[in-house]
């Protein structure tokens, strides 16, 4: 990530014409807002300015860059680039690669990480000579897998006001519909403010910048000023210095641009468009009505809006993500408590782009949409029962609707 000044100057000197040709060849050209063409996976938001498109492409370069130990990779890590885990059906999507988490539940049923600072993540790989490879303790009685979450439309999600999400929560189920979602209140490390978390399976981060910085540390072992300490469980600090002699933070601003890698990650995700909707016909419309009728929309809220913004890309724009971004117990929790989320809670995953995602659920155990629905319980029991009671035609319509997302 810490490129030389000469490299940065060469990149700048290539000019906009070369970047435009490359973007055209790879399909990364922003579509004008008036064209009304659904964005393809990996497109920039329609209507980005030339400067914003430059930031998008700068972020894309860093998102795809393969890190090396000399740049701070490791000593423990899960991947060597962001794109290594976010690439299906395009950069920013998912992959079947899963991270591994572990912890301990005591006799009272209370969950705890083995190290509160290191958290529950146990990286799969380490750099040579592998002296700092982390190992799950034998006494672990909770072990969970988590697959990547797509980041398409991340800037729109980031721009949804906290007040919108707070208005959706019903922690005491006062409306008696069986659904009692609650907002995850977390500290945004970039500002120090308490905000509603919305990124990650446990809604553990409130902003794209912190979400990317956390992944840079925990998935690649690269520190930044937001996360300045290596987080590997059970590694003695002196051994850590031997394994990783590069001074922290490792992600520092480039002299040529004044930007850190985490700033570039944020720009890519901010200007990355959501996946466009598939074909909508009469069966899909019937399926959408069924989706609402059986109670799926109680958590998978079809439409939210961004707040007021000086940037027209994010100024009171519709966000058709099919999620309330709240924490729920729907019977699919991984047993890991994290940030504001209890062990049995997960953040409602957005359904936009669902047709491009397999496998499903946080651990990838559901190969089909039907399997994912049947895994629902607790707060989602009524919705699952409604699905089970559908006749053949209504079920086909519902699955056609979900297949259009």
Image (cartoon, helix red, strand yellow):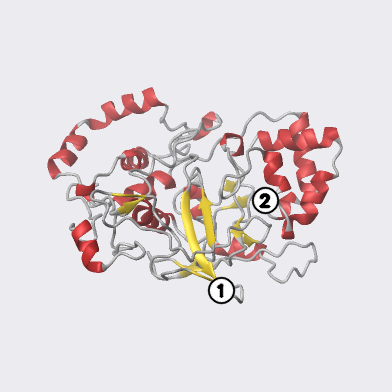
The residue singled out by tag 2 in the image is 300
The answer to whether 89 is drawn above or below residue 99 in the figure is above
Where residue 180 is drawn, which disc sits there? none
Query: x, y percentage for residue 278?
Result: 63, 31
Given the current orientation, which residue lies at the most extreme left position?
Answer: 6
Q: Please indicate whether residue 345 sits to the left or right of residue 6 in the image.
A: right
* Residue that appears at 60% across and 58% down: 346
Any part of residue 47 in sight = yes
Q: Quadrant of residue 162?
A: bottom right
Q: Quadrant of the C terminus?
A: top right
Query: x, y percentage for residue 137?
Result: 43, 63
* Residue that appears at 83% across and 36% down: 394
Q: Please indicate whether residue 158 sits to the left or right of residue 321 in the image.
A: left
The answer to whether 299 is drawn above or below residue 34 in the figure is below
Frontmost of labels 1 and 2 is 1
* Residue that appears at 62% across and 63% down: 344
* Residue that appears at 47% across and 31% down: 31
Query: x, y percentage for residue 147?
Result: 51, 47
**Is label 1 in a helix, a strand or a loop?**
loop
Q: Quadrant of residue 183?
A: bottom right
The residue singled out by tag 1 in the image is 106
Any part of residue 244 in sight = no
Q: Please indicate whether residue 384 sits to the left or right of residue 154 in the image.
A: right
């Amino acid at each position: 990530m810490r490129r030389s000044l000469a490299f940065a100057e060469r990149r700048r000197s290539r000019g906009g014409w070369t970047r435009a040709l490359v973007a055209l060849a790879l399909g990364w050209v922003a579509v004008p807002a008036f064209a009304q063409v659904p964005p393809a996976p990996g497109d920039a938001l329609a209507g980005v300015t030339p400067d914003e498109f430059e930031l998008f492409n700068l972020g894309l370069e860093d998102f795809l860059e393969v890190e090396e130990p000399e740049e701070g990779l490791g000593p423990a890590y899960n991947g060597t680039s962001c794109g290594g885990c976010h690439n299906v059906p395009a950069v920013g999507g998912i992959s079947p690669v899963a991270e591994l988490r572990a912890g301990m539940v005591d006799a009272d049923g209370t969950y705890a990480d083995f190290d509160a600072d290191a958290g529950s993540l146990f990286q799969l790989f380490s750099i040579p000579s592998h002296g700092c490879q982390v190992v799950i303790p034998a006494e672990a009685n909770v072990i969970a897998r988590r697959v990547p979450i797509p980041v398409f439309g991340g800037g729109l999600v980031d721009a949804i006001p906290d007040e919108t999400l707070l208005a959706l929560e019903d922690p005491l189920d006062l409306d008696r519909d069986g659904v009692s979602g609650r907002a995850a209140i977390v500290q945004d490390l970039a500002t120090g403010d308490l905000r509603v978390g919305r990124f990650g399976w446990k809604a553990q981060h409130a902003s794209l910048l912190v979400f990317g910085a956390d992944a840079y540390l925990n998935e690649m072992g690269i520190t930044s000023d937001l996360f300045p300490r290596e987080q590997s469980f059970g590694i003695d600090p002196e051994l850590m210095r031997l394994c990783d002699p590069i001074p922290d933070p490792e992600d520092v601003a480039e002299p040529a641009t004044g930007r850190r890698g985490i700033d570039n990650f944020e720009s890519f995700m901010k200007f990355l468009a959501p996946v466009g909707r598939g074909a909508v016909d009469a069966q899909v419309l019937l399926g959408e009505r069924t989706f609402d009728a059986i109670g799926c929309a109680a958590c998978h809220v079809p439409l939210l809006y961004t707040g007021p913004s000086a940037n027209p890309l994010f100024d009171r724009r519709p966000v058709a993500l099919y999620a309330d971004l709240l924490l729920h117990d729907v019977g699919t929790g991984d047993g890991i408590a994290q940030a504001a989320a209890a062990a049995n809670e997960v953040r409602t995953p957005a359904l936009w782009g669902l047709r491009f995602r397999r496998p499903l659920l946080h651990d990838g155990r559901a190969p089909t949409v039907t399997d994912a629905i049947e895994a629902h319980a607790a707060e989602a029991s009524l919705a699952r029962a409604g699905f089970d009671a559908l006749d053949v035609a209504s079920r086909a319509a519902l699955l056609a609707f979900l297949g259009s997302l």
